[in-house]
Amino acid sequence: MRLVFVGPPGAGKGTQAKLICERWKIPQISTGDMLRAAKASGQLPEELVKQMAAGGLVPDEVVIDLISKRTQDADAKEGFLLDGFPRTVPQADALDRVLESRGQKLTVVLALEVPKENLIERAVLRRTDKRTGQIYHLKYKPPPPDAEAHLEHRPDDHEEVVRNRVEVYEKMTADLLPHYEKSGRLKRIDGVGTVEEVTARVIAALEAVR
Ligand code: ADP
Ligand code: AMP
């Protein structure tokens, strides 16, 4: 299975991706996580650090290069789940070309749909355990006491930046979702409800296309 998760910041892509990847034993590939790891090890150019901190997108070439290399790793041979990539039509076209050159294609693109008012609350109260990458929410998925000292509040998860990220997302998907819809590869998933309810919808959508 070669899957793409599209959805605004805070929609629950990372949360659902982890569960789906465990179930189907495929790697979760998140350009956001890869960029944050590059930043943490001091390898991300300062200009890109600034673009991320402001909630803007980094240039297409940067993420296309990351994905084209990462999807060639041995663990991605039988499939993968892309989380947060592609975000633009040029990224989507580049992904198609990379896969086509390897005789592969995407199975399906899942769009997680969540209204704006829920997104801000989901992202602003998100906390991630630095040691494990486990995603928590201060209201909906409270971290256990022993994780508290290790929680990270992403610098781009403050309200003003989240609002900007949601706006950037809306502008970019104005083209991206119709692009995938036209080629019959898009499935829309209602992302409102408990994590378990949304997972059940995602699994049902995937069972229908496998
Ligand atoms: P994304 O990867 O799309 O930015 P995350 O998976 O990190 O989103 O989820 C954003 C925040 O919302 C996290 O704090 C997560 O725990 C919480 N969350 C995820 N799914 C749900 C849900 N169905 N209901 C309530 N909160 C959720
Ligand atoms: P995410 O973790 O998916 O919310 O991504 C965090 C930030 O990383 C985004 O706000 C962008 O600055 C950058 N980023 C991640 N994926 C992409 C992408 N596919 N294209 C451009 N920028 C990206």
Image: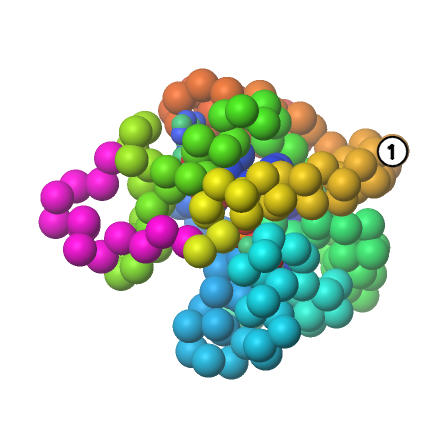
Residue 178 in which image quadrant:
top right
Where is the C terminus found, in terms of image quarters?
top right
Q: Position of residue 46 (x, y in %)?
A: 58, 77
Q: Which residue is at a point 68% across and 70% down the rendered structure image? A: 62
Amino acid marked by disc 1 = Lys
Task: Pick out the residue farthest to the right.
Answer: 182
Task: Pick out the residue farthest to the front.
Answer: 160
As helix, strand or loop, the secondary structure at mark 1 comes to: helix
In magenta stretch: residue 151: yes
Along the line of sight, which residue is nearer the eye, 27 or 148?
148
Q: Position of residue 15 (x, y in %)?
A: 43, 40
Which quadrant of the frame does ligand 2 lie within?
bottom right
Q: Is residue 17 left or right of residue 110?
A: left
Question: Can you say whether 40 is above or below 129 in the image?
Answer: below
Q: Is residue 48 left or right of residue 131?
A: right
Q: Which residue is at a point 77% across and 57% down the rendered structure image? A: 91
Q: Position of residue 98 (x, y in %)?
A: 77, 64
Residue 47 in which image quadrant:
bottom right
From this viewpoint, is residue 27 visible?
Answer: no
The residue where tag 1 is placed is 182
Disc 1 under 8 Å from ligand 2? The reply is no
Magenta region: 142-154
From this viewpoint, is residue 116 visible?
Answer: yes
Along the line of sight, which residue is nearer the eye, 57 or 108?
57
Graded by Cα atoms within 10 Å as few (under 14), some (14 to 19) or many (20 or more), the crowding at tag 1 reads: few
